[in-house]
Image: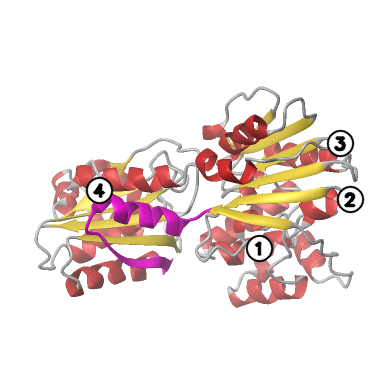
Amino acid sequence: MRDQAVKLFEAAVKAADPALALRPHLAELPAIDGRYLLISVGKAACAMVEEAIASLPKDARFEAIAVTNYENERPISGCRVMAAGHPVPDENGAKAGRAVIDLLETATAADVVLALISGGGSALLPAPVEGISLSDKAEVSRVLLSVGVDINEMNAIRQQLSRLKGGGMARLAAPAALHSFILSDVIGDDLRAIASGPTVSPITTRAGAVELLRSHGVFEAMPDSVKAHLLSDGPEPEQIETENTLIGSNRHSIEAMRAASGDGVVVSDALIGDVNDAARFVVESAKQNSATVLLFGGETTVILQGDGRGGRNQELALRLAALAETEELGDWVFLSGGTDGRDGPTDAAGGIVDKHTLQRIRDAGHDPAALLANNDSYMALKTAGDLLMSGATGTNVADVQVFLRR
């Protein structure tokens, strides 16, 4: 069952292959008088920009920048590849943001901009508005992650602090035509939230961002520069009409798992919210549904209460193992993994647990409950031999989960 779970996870990742998803949309690019400007941002940036370069008309003039995370960086002929920090922005990301802005500011009416957007692009391409430093933006991300803010809320706030997010890339590209191709890592596929929507209108206003921060009790924890900007009375940014095309999503990957399983049942494509609630939902689903393969997708959140190491998929797997240990579910295996191959600040994609996981942790001399209380899911699953290790996949369509039993 563990092998089967891993194969279904691999099917989900394969379905999110960025080059294959992009290829049919670039099959008939026209010859133009100006240049093609290729801006590729996110964990799938390298694969997407390679496909785009290969799809350009013969002898087309072009300039290309790809910004991705360190694990997915690789050289690409004809493209400037820049690696940056994720999930917390770093100085390399700021340099990449400046490079993208510099290129877009050269765009003319004769040029065409191809924006290739994938998950992770928001943190990878920080371009703070005037008066806000990179360290200020990094602190915003740190605080929001610590209180379990979901990805849509996170990006709604990030948009208000950036020159590129919330349609900023489209505004900078004018008067060139801009076509955006988007690989979604956001449940529900709201284009405004994917990579913080660099080519679409923002999710909210500055005042809306303030209200959101206050609802989580963290407005006063924001840097002074961020509070000052969000409370300012200046005009909201102008909106630019662009052409945006969704080329892949979490739902596509779940359907690929269902097809690969033969008899799998898709229980939910919106497994979101706190990991403890999500774990309970999976266990209850297993109790109420007799199918041998249950499939889920989504993106949960973790409220940090300790100083341990892990990620939302590892913690979800460990919490499910704790909840299911005393349930009569037969022999079972549960996998939760990030399709990007990276779960939190670790080298694991997630976790793969079974009915004996907690006992293996105890046999190794550790207390599973104490590890959970410290958010130390990585240590717990490593001790049990239950880390899901895939390496960076070069794509990102959020998380998938598989529950198998016999």
At label 2, the amino acid type is: Pro
- How far across and how far down the image is residue 196, in percent? 66, 57
Highlighted range, magenta: 248-274
| Circle 3 crowding by C-alpha within 10 Å: few under 14, some 14–19, many from 20 | some
| Chain-order first, disc 4 or disc 3 | 4
33 left or right of 181 in image: right
In the rendered structure, which disc, 2 or 3, sits on the residue that comes first in sequence?
A: 3
> Which structural element holds mark 2?
loop
- Tell which of 59 and 118 is nearer to you: 59
Whether the magenta-drawn stretch holds residue 79 is answered as: no
Rendered image: mark on residue 34: 3
Is residue 264 part of the magenta span, yes or no?
A: yes
User: What residue type is disc 4 on?
Assistant: Ala
Q: Which residue is mark 4?
A: 5
| Image spot of residue 220 (x, y percent) | 68, 69
Residue at mark 1: 192
Tell me the element at label 3. Answer: loop
**Which residue: 77% across, 38% down?**
37
Residue type of the residue flagged with mark 1: Arg
On residue 309, the disc is: none
